[in-house]
Amino acid sequence: MRLQIDMDILKDDFQASILLACWPGMGYVASSVAKYLKNHLPTELIASISPNELFQLPGISVKSGLIEPIFIPKSEFYLWQREDKSLLIFIGESQPVLGKEFVLANTILDFAQAHGVKRVFTAAAMPLEISHKDTPGVWAVGSDETVTNMLTQNDIRLMKRGTISGMNGSFLGVAKEKGFEAICLLGEIPFYTVQIENPKTTKAVIEVFTMLTGITVDTSELDEVSQFMEKEVDEYLKIVQEKGERITKDKGPETLH
């Protein structure tokens, strides 16, 4: 079973060597990486996946007695092409309902494979006991020893054990079964910031991604955002301390998404 791809906007005469697929998750790392690349490379929207079987409507919002418009998450493909390089970016605005991960992963990967993609990337957050003032590191997992050897040769640390859940996990598992070179880049975030954006981590993951792919993009815009977010977290921690609350420290979960 495969999901319907919207043919109205489909540009079918293209080839791409790399796919980056991302969904919202902890620290908004994956979606921030994909959206930044989409916005800072000259990409074009080329296709979308029908949302009919992917999402449920849990309810509606009401404001001042009026029913708010329904939010239907988009699942879209963007293409960046240059004479010597090309990149297909898939951005899902929401993770699908439980049980649809496998069919969505197959739909995305079949589409990518039909257009020449050999290597796929996704991204996730790795919550650790670090400070938001630290420079975050990037870890990775790969689909086979050839991939992991390439990662270690580029001084990227490997996540030795654990679980990657949600669409990231399903996507990587299906990609391995289909014979893709699959890589998940895991950006470190402070465990107490899993509900807010982490522009430092976004930049760190993008820098590793561009190093591995040879695709260049200016990330200086993220420096200013990082400074702003650092001040915001400082203020949050100050309020927490003033209230006498205690943030429980741990070594970070073994299940990532």
Image: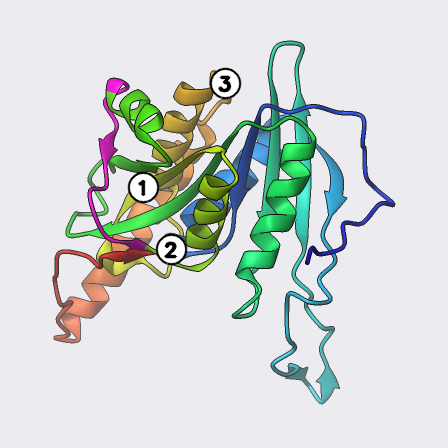
238 left or right of 90? left
255 left or right of 128? right
Q: Which residue is mark 1?
A: 187
Main SS category, magenta section = loop
Amino acid type indicated by mark 3: Thr
Amino acid type indicated by mark 1: Gly
What secondary structure is marked by label 3?
loop
Query: Taking 99 as reference, is 74 above or below it?
Result: above
Front residue of this view, candidates 81 and 121: 121
Circle 3 crowding by C-alpha within 10 Å: few under 14, some 14–19, many from 20:
some
179 left or right of 188? right
Tag of residue 145: none
Circle 2 crowding by C-alpha within 10 Å: few under 14, some 14–19, many from 20:
many
Q: Is residue 42 visible?
A: no
Amino acid type indicated by mark 2: His
Q: Which residue is mark 3?
A: 216
> Hey, which quadrant is residue 58 in on the image?
bottom right
Q: Position of residue 201 (x, y in %)?
A: 34, 40
Q: Residue at x 60, y 42 (%)?
A: 109
Q: Which residues are magenta?
A: 153-163
